[in-house]
Image: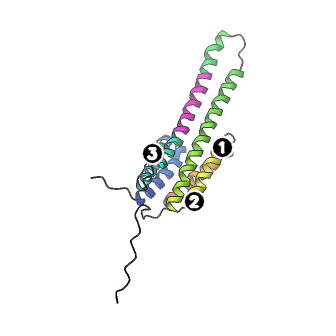
Amino acid sequence: MRLMPTMRDVKIYGGLGALLSLLSFVPHIGIVLSIAGLVLILIAIKYLSDMVNEPQLFKNMIIAMVAYIVGIVIFFLVVFGTLLSAIFSAPHTPKVSWLPVLLGVISGLVVLWLACIVGGVFIKRTYDRVAEITGIDLFKTTGLLYLIGSALLIVIIGGIILLVAKVLEAVSFFSIKEESPASPQPPPPPPPVS
């Protein structure tokens, strides 16, 4: 028998996931911790989506994550392919031009940037709705910072804004009250009979 998830589950999984995803800088295990954190956040959003019977909530978060992942993969493939092409063509050309390498790296960065903006839009949609469901307006701020940080990622300040968004994400999840938004309020007691 599967138990229905609770707001407590959303709070714990989302909060711990946000904290773990902040640890990507830890040597050797940071990437693993960060991925585990993202999975926990996805589980939290899935639980909330199921609790309020709103599948689009989870779909928006999945689209955001896929956009970020696709952007990162394409960036590395383009940059790696460009560098390999330059390395293997260097012995066969009398004068090596760095312009194709530079254009390849710039193309990869543009694709990554656009994918991050798409991801930011869908995270904002997700967290705007989570704010409406939970009554925690800090989720709206978190979503907005994700969008702004993603748009400004092309300059260094975007990374700092995304870091602030991650911290606010943890605070937002840990601020969730443990009552279920899907459970109806009990009816008021009947008036006394005289």
81, 191: nearer the viewer: 191
Disc on the earlier residue, 3 or 2? 3
Expressed as whole percent of the image width and height from the top left, the position of residue 133 reads 50, 59
Magenta part of the chain: 66-82
Give the residue number, with chain letter if any, for mark 3.
39
Assess disc 3: are there few (<14), some (14-19) or many (≥20) residues with their C-alpha within 10 Å of its C-alpha: some
Expressed as whole percent of the image width and height from the top left, the position of residue 118 reads 59, 41
185, 3: nearer the viewer: 185
97, above or below 174, in the image? above
**Residue 93 relative to residue 15: left or right:** right
Q: Which mark is residue 25?
A: none
Instruction: Give the main secondary structure of the magenta stretch.
Output: helix
The answer to whether marks 3 and 2 mark residues whose Cβ atoms lie closer than 8 Å is: no
Mark 3, secondary structure of its residue:
helix
Residue 11 found in image quarter: bottom left
19, above or below 76, in the image? below
Q: Residue at x 66, y 28 (%)?
A: 107
**Residue 54 relative to residue 169: left or right:** left
Let me know if residue 131 is in the magenta part.
no
Expressed as whole percent of the image width and height from the top left, the position of residue 170 reads 52, 55
Assess disc 2: are there few (<14), some (14-19) or many (≥20) residues with their C-alpha within 10 Å of its C-alpha: some
Q: Residue at x 55, y 44 (%)?
A: 25
Mark 2, secondary structure of its residue:
helix
Q: Amino acid at mark 1?
A: Ala
Q: Quadrant of the C terminus?
A: bottom left
Disc on the earlier residue, 3 or 1? 3
Give the residue number, with chain letter if any, for mark 1.
151
Let me know if residue 77 is in the magenta part.
yes
121, 14: nearer the viewer: 121
Q: Amino acid at mark 3?
A: Val
Give the residue number, with chain letter if any, for mark 2.
138
